[in-house]
Amino acid sequence: MYMLKKGLAIVVGSILLSIGINYFFIPYHVLDGGMIGIGLITKYIWGWKAGLTIILLSFPIFIIAWFKYRKYFYNSLHGMLVSSFFIDLFRTLRESPIILEAPFSSVLGGVFVGLGIGIMLRAQTSTGGTDLIAQFISDISGFNVGVIIFVIDSLVILIGGFLISTNTLLLSVVAIIVIGITTSLYTWKPLKDT
């Protein structure tokens, strides 16, 4: 039953994430942080498939995880593969007419992506990528993993904004704030009385 619930969470979370990226982010060149953001940068600049790029760039990270952090490897590999597959599979959503202004599209896309990530995190899986790098750094350095993820995501957004446009940077900042809030609300657990 546990594996069925986890598999369902990966599929549902990946679909929501893919809708957010393809329908709301890509038409306005909005970025997410981390490896997804890097995949989107390559999509916007060179026209590469974002999902395939995410898989290829994540490969070395997962090799390290296999040898050093096997638990993280197993908890993230499926999420990364399935979400990358759906990102490329749902690319036809980009052709649908967008009737929202760019800032609203960034917000709604952030809700979809944040909810997708939250569903996967509650099932103890993720999309891997730079989240795994952050976990590695946290284990070695003792720094808070959330702070490390924030720094990595910020760097991706800044680089993307520099390479693409200031508009991309501003819309992406809105998107990652909404992603963070949505993910936090979905995964929040109240403190239990002792």
Image (tube, rainbow, N blue to C red):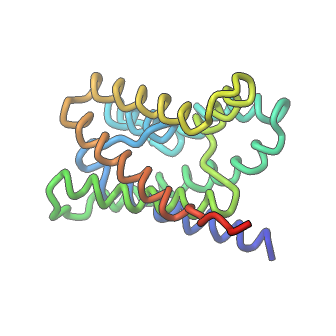
Say left or right for 10 vs 67: left
Q: Position of residue 74 (x, y in %)?
A: 78, 48
Q: Quadrant of residue 123?
A: bottom right
Q: Position of residue 57 (x, y in %)?
A: 58, 31
Residue visible at 64% across and 53% down in the picture: 79
Whether residue 60 is visible = no
Say left or right for 107 vs 128: left
Residue visible at 69% across and 53% down in the picture: 78
Residue visible at 30% across and 56% down in the picture: 24
Q: Position of residue 3 (x, y in %)?
A: 79, 68
| Quarter occupied by the C terminus | bottom right
Say left or right for 12 vs 59: left
Q: Quadrant of residue 71?
A: top right
Q: Position of residue 179 (x, y in %)?
A: 41, 52
| Quarter occupied by the N terminus | bottom right
Compared to residue 86, the image places residue 29 above or below, namely above
Question: Nearest the camera: 39 or 187?
Answer: 187
Residue visible at 45% across and 57% down in the picture: 114
Whether residue 134 is visible = yes
